[in-house]
Amino acid sequence: MHQVNYTARTQPFRYSLLVLSMMGLAPVAQAQDSDTDVKNEDQTVEVIDVTGSRIRRTDIESHTPVVSFDAGDIAKTGTVDINELLNELPSMTPAGGTETSNANGYAGISRQDLRGLGSNRTLVLVNGRRHVPSLPGTSEVDVSSIPTALIKRVDIMTGGASAIYGADAVSGVVNIILKDDFEGTEASVSYNQTGDGDGKRWYGTFTHGQNFEDGKGNFNVHVSYQTSDAVEARTRDYVANDLTYITNPNGDSPAQILAHRSPLYATNERAFLIDGLPYRLDASGALVAMTAEGEDVFGTSTTQLAALTVDSSNPNFYTRYNWGRLAVPVDKLSLNLNLSRELGNEVQLTSEFKYVKTESESRTEPLAEYGVTRLARNYPFYTAEQQAEVARTGQGLLFGGYFPEVGRAGSDYEYDLFQAVVTLEGRIGDGYRWQLSAQHGQTSVDTTYVNDYSQSYWDKEVWGTQGWVWTGTEWSWESSCDEGCSINVFQPLSSDTLAALQLDPHTSKAKLKQTVVSASIDGDLFELPAGYASFAAGVEHRREQSTSTPSDTQLNGIGANYYTANPLSGKYDVTEAFAEVRVPLLSDMLLADSMVLSGAWRTAKYSTAGTNHSWMVGLDWNPFDSLKLRTSRAKAARAPNINEIYQEESQYWNYVYEVCYSAYRKNGSEYREANCNARGLEDPANYYNDALIVYSGNEDLKAERAYTFTAGMVYSPEVLQGLNLIVDYWDINLVDKIGTINWSSVYPNCMDSQSLDNVFCDMLEFHDDYTQVNVAYLNLASHKTRGIDYALDYSYHFANLGFSLGLRSNWSRLMQRDLQSDPNAEIVQTMGELAFPKWRGRNTLTLWTEDLSLSMVGHYIGSQTPDNSNDPADYSVYDTGRLWYLDMGLNYHFNDHTSVNVYVSNLTGRETPQIPAANTGGASWEQGYTAGLYTTLGRYYSLGITHKF
């Protein structure tokens, strides 16, 4: 964002109170010092770009709350990925990152999620302009592709900003401002690792910049590279411990108590049941008990291993998180070239070129069987003891276990991102600024699937063939080994079996292209008694195209679970026009030091979603110099993206719980049992059903809309210089929300509705031997959330002692978070559940001198519960309790050239709260990943050195 100086008319220059509204992680004044220059002798002022407005201003005030931090604050924390620092803000819900993307797709990509509305509703800008998305088919930006060494300042605007910046700014904007006019040469290197000695990360940067042609031009080049290691879940016993609720065996209150249980399929030795107890075979085929005499086996089923557990102290079984990862490895190379040149007549040319290459990987579990499907009664590898059990029960054996010899399933990701931006800006007449901009970017993603296997080969050579078999008393649908059944599942798989079973790595490819051209103008319209009315207006045209080509294995559905995908090709274009005005109403009056009315309107015409409108109205009122009151009302709109519209059908097999089964039929709503009876499911024999899960896009989607309201105050008492206080209330009502319903909740919601005539049942197709779940993108009902943000900033300079002390505090109080998937569905209240505590806060205490800075940061996370519908009286541990994390840092400048930074995150080594689901990080079911607000890595160290040549 470039500054253009011009001579003001009669408008006096002065900073007003929102210096503090941009605080948060960093001192706001410090973030803005380099952007301000007052020349009182000729009334020349520097007009600056302000996040939250297209109108260039002489102050940094905004009617919408904005939090800011600068390069110094980034350096002090030792962070390599700006995502890590952003996620500490109380307004952020952790989205994709190195600690959250292992099992959620696109490992190694960092995304932002303001207010927990989803990362596709948070718009990421660089220098006030759109950045090319990092995930094809979406608008989501990998903020880790923006090197921290190049960042000058980050502004986070919390509130709907579609009228100002366009679609995707439903919950707010993250605007990353890069350093410009860089002169000299700077290099840095940092090293990080956890207190357990893993999670090692190296980061190195080199930046060189210089002016040319007597300062009329400047160029800078930047190179950075980082590499980091994976962290396995099994290395943290507070994560991988299978914590669960169980029914109190004493029948006392509370009814539910905590226990550590391992499922009977969680073993590398294939387990099977004889007379209800788990056994395995050793290498000689001898029977080996997997539980000690008298040891309990727990579960509601007497047969199926997936429903049975033992105490986790049993060494023969491990936890279901044994194969998880708490951090994915990342290698990232960034190349950046920036050029600026004055062309004469106050016209400025700037250009930005960047290339980012990222490599990462995800790894989950190897091939596994969960003990829910029976082997054939004539399975050829039964021992005598197993044959006796088959004869006793009249059924084939169930077995469960992992096959690590097949290798851990997962994906290798390779991302290539390129973007070029060229901008011309200048001035027309007395103070009008114009800007022309053109940019093009593209992202390519190669996803290579490893350790996949042929599902058809596995099914035939383990289960044989299936059909109706006469048991002597009735016909039963069973497996038969008259054909196939060449694999002995009770022993490690042979090399011949592995050669036939394993598939070669196969790669899918995806690509996104984005082109944006825009033109804008801003300046003063006319003079009013209270000052000049100003405006900004412009047009923008954007084209996006995404394609994806699945691998041959996916196209033919021959891999694990018969996963089948089809090619995607989609594109759209949108033409937008916007206008913004800022009108001073009152000035220098009693109880009206100033009053300014702001408004904005944007019309966007999509080739896919028709014409959509966004608007904003805001009012800033300073009754007197030390108090500012502000409010805004806005409508934001987001059109469906390419994936949401054009995604072709993909499918795979899984299973759904039969909610009408005897153990579950009374656990749902008051309507469940009647609906089960209406379907003829009075007493189903099985507690699960095979399920074909089918995903697809929806060309009939319409744009979603969000209505936002904010109101707050900024107070800087004159009697206590250096103190700033902020309170802001916010309210967001998202309607026609675009999304999918979690496939595993479709059937339960169908049976829990008032009748079988509902949107959930419409997504189901019931067949004789399986259930099909059709999961398409839909315009869901609504998502309502509101709360209050608090901030405090205070600093004091002890002149006689030669040091300064500062305190900064950001807090957020969530007051409502309600989800509704359909107008006829019940409202789900998620405030206070995992990932959405009522209170979050971050406090920073800093002591600094000219060369030394010491900081202590305290993060607060309020109490959360896995399920609001639980009765606290029924649970021995109902919630996580409140938790503080403590960080400490030291930054020291040896001289003008060299500085060192040391930072320790989670200084006390706090572990995750030991309550089910929170012990793995405290994530929300909506977000679908393991880690949430809580750190799963433990203590983390960072050491960095920077040298300027």
Image (cartoon, grey):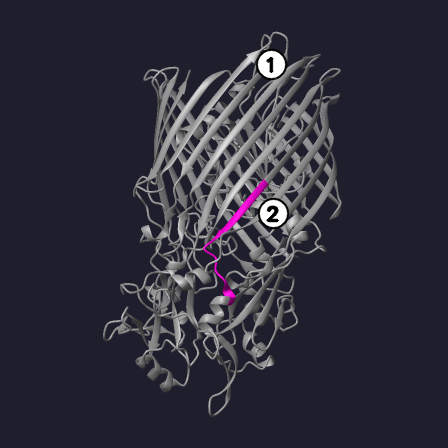
**Image point (39%, 16%), residue name:** 897
- The quadrant in which residue 416 appears is top right
C-alpha span from label 2 to label 1: 45 Å
Give the left or right position of residue 663, taking residue 551 as reference: left
Badge 2 marks a residue whose secondary structure is strand
Determine crowd level at label 1: few under 14, some 14-19, many 20+ residues with C-alpha closer than 10 A: some
Q: Which of 407 and 523 lies nearest the eye of the viewer?
A: 407
Q: Does the stretch in magenta take in 152?
A: no
Residue 278 versus residue 365 in the image, above or below: below
The spot of residue 91 in percent (x, y) is: 51, 42
Residue 386 versus residue 518 in the image, above or below: below
Which amino acid lies under the numbered mark 2 shown in the image of this protein? Ile
Residue 423 visible in this rendered orientation of the protein:
yes
Residue 949 versus residue 534 in the image, above or below: above
Write down the region rendered in magenta: 444-456
Q: Which of 383 and 513 lies nearest the eye of the viewer?
A: 383
The spot of residue 175 in percent (x, y) is: 57, 33
Mark 2 against mark 1, which lies toward the viewer? 1
**Image point (52%, 60%), residue name:** 559
Badge 1 marks a residue whose secondary structure is strand
Q: Of label 2 and label 1, which has the lower sequence position?
A: 1
Q: Which mark is residue 703?
A: none
- Which residue is most to the front? 496
- The quadrant in which residue 699 appears is bottom right
For label 1, the residue is 217
Q: Which mark is residue 732?
A: 2
